[in-house]
Image: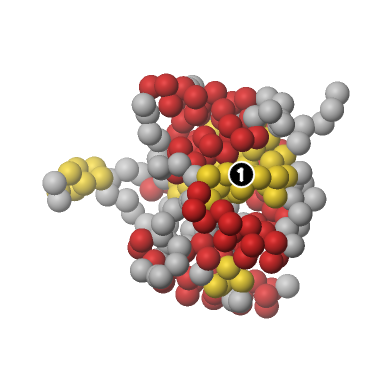
Amino acid sequence: MTPSKSIALIPAAGMGKRMGASVNKQYLQLNGLPIVARTISAFEHSPLIYAIYLVIPADEIPYCQEHIVTACGFKKIAAIVPGGRERQNSVMNGLNAMRNCLTDDDVVLIHDGVRPLVTENMLRESIAVARTHDGALVAVPTKDTIKIVADGIVVDTPPRETLWQAQTPQSFRFGVIHAAHLSAEKDGFVGTDDSSLVERNGGKICIVPGDYRNIKITTPEDLILAEAFLAGIAKES
């Protein structure tokens, strides 16, 4: 039997309005390298990853090809796929682009383009779990108390020990995640993440321990924090 492959799907089609920058946030510099290039590097240099599909706004594809893929010498990029209206549409575009190249048992790791501090261990654990379960979700326990609020009034305080903060990658066998996206598209359902689509189809998602440094860079404060985390990681190594 041919062993299953592991494919990275990196959606980076967001506009990044909260960053307040003149360019989309994925192209901002993080310690001398564009954020999205740092993210791609984690998968490019992993021996676990067979290929990478990158999802980018259609009008940015030439720029991304020249200034990210070619400039950084990435070899595993199988395709740069045009993004959709929402993130869920972008992921579906990526899944459709790879469907003729994968079997249902191949593992797809869906990872935010602006989450550059993912580790090799997260990739390894995610792949192993996704091969034997409906999905693998990298997550960390919530540190803060969470309040459920309606019209400015607290209506409930869920037990903190039951709450986890979802990160990426979120990993699935291709057949599982493609079916979940097709079902959501058919029913007009929009989920908060890819895991929620599989959950909706009755799938059981297993937690893979993440890292509080595996942040999604959304605001200027996140960029400062990521720079500090990178400095700390450099000292550790």
What's the coloring here?
Answer: secondary structure
Residue picked out by circle 1: 9
Of 147 and 167, nearer the camera is 167
Up-down: is 146 above or below 230? above
Task: Locate residue 37 relative to residue 50 in the image: left or right.
Answer: left
Q: Give residue 94's position: percent from left, percent from top.
A: 57, 39
Residue at horizontal 68 percent and vertical 25 percent from the top: 104
Tell me the quarter of the image containing the C terminus.
bottom right
Residue 162 in the image: x percent, y percent?
42, 42
The amino acid type of the residue labelled 1 equals Leu
Residue 193 appears in view: no
Identity of the residue furthest to the right in this view: 1
Q: Position of residue 226 (x, y in %)?
A: 53, 70
Task: Determine the secondary structure under disc 1.
Answer: strand
* Residue plotted at (70% across, 50% down): 77
| Local crowd size for mark 1, using a 10 Å CA cut-off: few (<14), some (14–19), many (≥20) | many
Q: Residue at x 61, y 35 (%)?
A: 97
- Could you tell whether 86 is left or right of 48 in the image? left
Residue placed most toward the observer, 34 or 233: 34
**Residue at screen point 82% across, 31% down:** 3
Query: Where residue 137 sits in the image (x, y, percent)?
Result: 55, 41
Say if residue 43 shows up in the picture: yes
